[in-house]
Image (cartoon, rainbow, N blue to C red):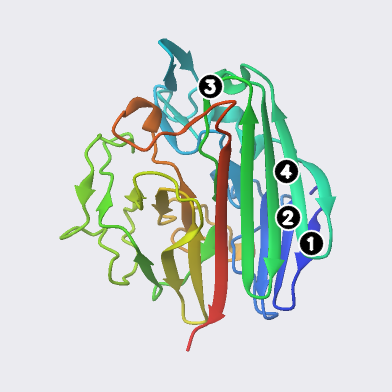
């Protein structure tokens, strides 16, 4: 296990690992860890399912790893069934050892550089992460600059610990149906009369691994997009991102030592829409020298009443 870095407010304690910029722990009012975590000495299985990491620079799935930019098709390495690039392939940001650029009691900054061509994508890219805690809110800010047009959709991938009686509310009227490869079909479908209608709080269907269409473009400031309620606490997520990928955790590993098993954690990932580079009707995920990538996501906690 590499060195960890801890930040704290009067109510939150968060611990991070430069390996993948992983959030290893988040404690609220001295309660239990709210995210799934296990020591690497026990197993790498959770690590291999992206637990707690930053994923990207192009999060989610890309069909065939093909990214068309300016009349040229760039090829990302495929790491899922040989035909899909998931979270930018086998050498994405989750596999980077990030540099700690700054830290004080309540804030931590990570940085990482991707050279031109890394992961099959163009551009010399510099990525900065800022995690900051204040009272009962953890804020994550992400920026990426580039010297050539390149896609950017970076996501934070913690698994929030849940029990079967959780409830999830999502501010989305539409979602993206997927095919057998878990890739968007291209249809933007209403959530009404489907298992994915979370406009009223309900438990996550175990078959959920879908993008919820929050907006048609990124927002300038974070807006509330989801509320996860458990018997002990309530998590509200606000973000500037236009999509929220929700994964039920149905294929999480079984790790008895850490009380981890399928469906014990859910991933709630603000990001751009998956495979947007191959769907012109989806929100644009291109980053250019004149238009850097920027995301702000806030996690606010309170006790369940």
Q: Nearer the viewer, residue 57 or 179?
A: 57
Q: Is residue 122 above or below residue 110?
A: above
Image marks 3 and 4: residues in contact by CB distance under 8 Å: no
Q: Is residue 23 left or right of residue 79?
A: right
**Residue 105's spot in the image, x, y percent?**
83, 65
Residue receiving disc 3: 149
First in sequence, mark 3 or 1: give its number: 1
Q: Is residue 109 above or below residue 276?
A: below
Q: Determine the residue positioned at 38% across, 33% down.
A: 276
**Helix, strand or loop at disc 2?**
strand
Residue receiving disc 2: 16
Inter-mark Cα distance, 2 to 1: 6 Å
Q: Is residue 274 left or right of residue 105?
A: left
Q: Residue furthest bottom?
A: 305
First in sequence, mark 2 or 3: give its number: 2
First in sequence, mark 2 or 1: give its number: 1
Crowding at mark 3 (Cα within 10 Å: few <14, some 14-19, many 20+)? many
Image marks 2 and 3: residues in contact by CB distance under 8 Å: no
Q: Determine the residue positioned at 49% across, 63% down.
A: 237
Q: Residue furthest front?
A: 290
**Residue 205's spot in the image, x, y percent?**
31, 60
Q: Residue furthest left?
A: 193
| Residue 94 location, quadrant | top right
Q: Is residue 35 above or below residue 305?
A: above
Image marks 2 and 1: residues in contact by CB distance under 8 Å: yes
Residue receiving disc 4: 19
Camera-near label (2 vs 3) is 3
Inter-mark Cα distance, 4 to 1: 14 Å
Crowding at mark 2 (Cα within 10 Å: few <14, some 14-19, many 20+)? many
**Residue 216's spot in the image, x, y percent?**
34, 45
């Amino acid at each position: 296990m590499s060195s960890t870095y801890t930040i704290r407010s009067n109510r939150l304690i968060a611990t991070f690992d430069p390996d993948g910029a992983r959030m290893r722990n988040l404690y609220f009012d001295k309660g239990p860890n709210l995210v799934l975590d296990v020591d690497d000495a026990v197993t790498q299985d959770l690590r291999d399912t992206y637990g707690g990491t930053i994923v990207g620079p192009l999060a989610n799935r890309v069909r065939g790893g093909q990214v068309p930019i300016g009349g040229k098709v760039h090829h990302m390495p495929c790491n899922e069934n040989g035909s899909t690039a998931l979270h930018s392939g086998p050498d994405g940001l989750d596999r980077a050892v990030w540099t700690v650029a700054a830290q004080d009691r309540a804030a931590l900054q990570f940085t990482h550089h991707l050279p031109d061509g890394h992961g099959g994508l163009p551009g010399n890219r510099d990525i900065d992460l800022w995690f900051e805690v204040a009272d009962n809110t953890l804020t994550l800010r992400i920026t990426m600059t580039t010297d050539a047009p390149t896609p950017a959709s970076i996501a934070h991938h913690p698994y929030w610990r849940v029990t079967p009686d959780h409830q999830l509310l999502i501010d989305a009227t539409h979602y993206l149906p997927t095919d057998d490869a878990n890739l968007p079909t291209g249809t933007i479908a209403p959530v009404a009369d489907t298992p994915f209608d979370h406009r009223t709080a309900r438990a996550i269907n175990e078959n959920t691994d879908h993008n919820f269409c929050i907006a048609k473009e990124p927002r300038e400031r974070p807006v509330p997009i989801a509320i996860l309620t458990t018997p002990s606490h309530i998590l509200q997520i606000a973000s500037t991102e236009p999509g929220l990928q929700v994964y039920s955790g149905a294929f999480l590993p079984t790790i008895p030592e850490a009380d981890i098993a399928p469906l014990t954690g859910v991933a709630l990932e603000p990001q751009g829409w998956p495979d947007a580079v191959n769907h012109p009707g989806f929100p644009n995920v291109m980053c250019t020298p004149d238009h850097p990538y920027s995301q702000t996501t806030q996690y606010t906690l309170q006790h369940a009443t």
